[in-house]
Amino acid sequence: MGVMQVSDASIVRLIERIGEHYRSNISNRYIRPALLQLPFDNQSWDLMEDLTEKPPAQALHLDELYREIMAAAHFVSVVRRELPSIRSRVGRGDPSSPDRVLREMAVNNFASNLQVFADLVNELFVKLVEIDKAEAKGHMPVHAKMPELGNIGRLLIG
């Protein structure tokens, strides 16, 4: 059996929502500089970018999506652990800046926005596993061949 492709419209829409939420509320111009200082490897950043910047017309491969979800789950876990330092880095901006209020809003809403991101990624994972199981038809589902996916829920739910 070759690489399983996903073309479910609800999956494509969910990935679009994840990307929009990530760009607007997680990796926006106020927070991104602090995120780039996190202990997060380049390969994981690349996978995060693949998930959050993916053009929806592109063929979606299940194994790639699982790797991107794993990177997103690690990202959520690292960000939660580093939240106090992220807050202080972002909060240290110029107090007289015209962007001060927007920056403070981004920082103050960051934890809840991170939770929304984690919930969306978890929803994507659950839907993919359902599709994966349904398509396996007597074979081992793709997710079952990837033991590293075993702690996704714990990483995302925290």
Image: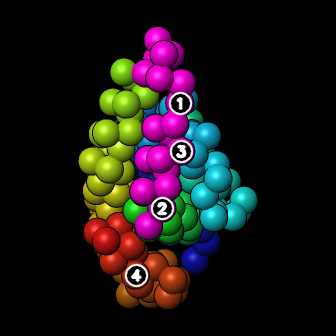
Q: Which mark is residue 93?
A: 1
Looking at the image, which residue is at 44% across and 47% down? 87
Q: Which is closer to the viewer, label 1 or label 4?
A: 1
Q: Where does residue 56 sit, x and y in percent of width and height?
A: 50, 38
Q: Is residue 114 visible?
A: yes
The residue indicated by pointer 2 is 82
- In this picture, is 101 found above or below 46? above
Q: Amino acid at mark 1?
A: Gly
Q: Amino acid at mark 4?
A: Asn
Q: Main secondary structure of the magenta part?
A: helix
- Front residue of this view, candidates 141 and 69: 69
Q: Which is closer to the viewer, label 1 or label 2?
A: 1
Q: Where does residue 111 sit, x and y in percent of width and height?
A: 32, 50
- Front residue of this view, candidates 44 and 58: 44
Q: Secondary structure at mark 1?
A: loop
The residue indicated by pointer 4 is 151
* Of the image marks 1 and 2, the number of the one nearer the N terminus: 2
C-alpha span from label 1 to label 2:
18 Å
The residue indicated by pointer 3 is 89
Q: Residues within 10 Å of mark 3 (few under 14, many from 20)?
A: some
Looking at the image, which residue is at 50% across and 87% down? 147
- Front residue of this view, candidates 130 and 152: 152
C-alpha span from label 2 to label 4:
20 Å
The quadrant of the image that shows the C terminus is bottom left
C-alpha span from label 3 to label 1:
8 Å
Q: Is residue 92 left or right of residue 24?
A: right
> What is the span of residues highlighted in magenta in the rendered image?
81-100
Query: Dividing the picture into quarters, in which one does residue 131 lie?
Result: bottom left
